[in-house]
Structure formats: C-alpha cells, structure tokens
Amino acid sequence: MTQAFYSDAAEKILSDLSTSERTAVMSVRASLEDDPTPDHARGLPDADPRSESYAIDLLPEQTGGRGITVVYRYSQALDAALILWLIAGP
C-alpha cells in the first residue's frame, strides 16, 4: 500500500475548500494509496529522475463546487505520493 501525504501548501489550500470540495480531494488521496498512477492521471514534466509528477482533474460535478486539479509527485522507490498543490478553478 502506497502512502499519500499533503505538502504544507496543499494542507493550507485544503482547509480553504468547501466541505464537498475537501471530500472530493480526500477521496483522490485515498485512491492514490491503492493506485498511485491511475489511468486518468496525466503525466507532468519532472526534474527529478527518481520520481514522476502527475495531475488529476476533478470536475465541478465531482466536487460539488469548483473544478480542482490535484498535482502530486510519486516516488516508486519510497512507494509514496506527495500531493504538492491543489488548484481550484472559478
């Protein structure tokens, strides 16, 4: 089982989300523990050769509010994912 964590920046943003938005983001975190590289995650450029960066887009229908992009980095060696940013749309 992969461990998934929030960065300090992501935790701050998480606290500013509505309850339904927060629930949607927390479900992404839980799903990353089962599958850290799901098919619906899109790869992002990563400067560190020991990790891979991804983004998962949550539509407003999924969040009950704004669209949110969850940006995270996965290290296969550590078997851990770090949610770096939560980007909430209008």
Image (cartoon, helix red, strand yellow):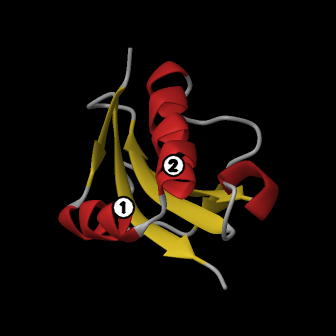
Q: Position of residue 89 (x, y in %)?
A: 64, 80
Q: Residue at x 56, y 25 (%)?
A: 35
Earlier residue among tags 1 and 2? 1
Secondary structure beneath disc 2? helix
- The C terminus: image quadrant: bottom right
Residue bearing mark 1: 14
Label 1 crowd (10 A; few <14 / some 14-19 / many >=20): many
Query: In the image, is 70 to the left or to the right of 75?
Result: right
Label 2 crowd (10 A; few <14 / some 14-19 / many >=20): many
Q: Amino acid at mark 2?
A: Val
Q: Residue at x 56, y 51 (%)?
A: 20
Q: Residue at x 46, y 41 (%)?
A: 26
Q: Position of residue 32 (x, y in %)?
A: 50, 32
When the figure is inspected, residue 63 is found, relative to residue 24, above or below; the finding is below
Q: Residue 8 sits in which quadrant? A: bottom left
Q: Position of residue 6 (x, y in %)?
A: 28, 51
Q: Amino acid at mark 1?
A: Leu
Residue bearing mark 2: 25
Q: Residue at x 59, y 36 (%)?
A: 37
Residue that protrudes farthest toward the right in the picture: 61
**Residue 72 seen in this snapshot:** yes
Tell which of 69 and 89 is nearer to you: 89
Question: CB atoms at circles 1 and 2 under 8 Å apart?
Answer: yes
When the figure is inspected, residue 26 is found, relative to residue 44, above or below; the finding is above
Tell which of 64 and 11 is nearer to you: 64
**Residue 53 seen in this snapshot:** no
Tell which of 46 and 42 is nearer to you: 42
Name the mark on residue 37: none
Secondary structure beneath disc 1? helix
Image label count:
2
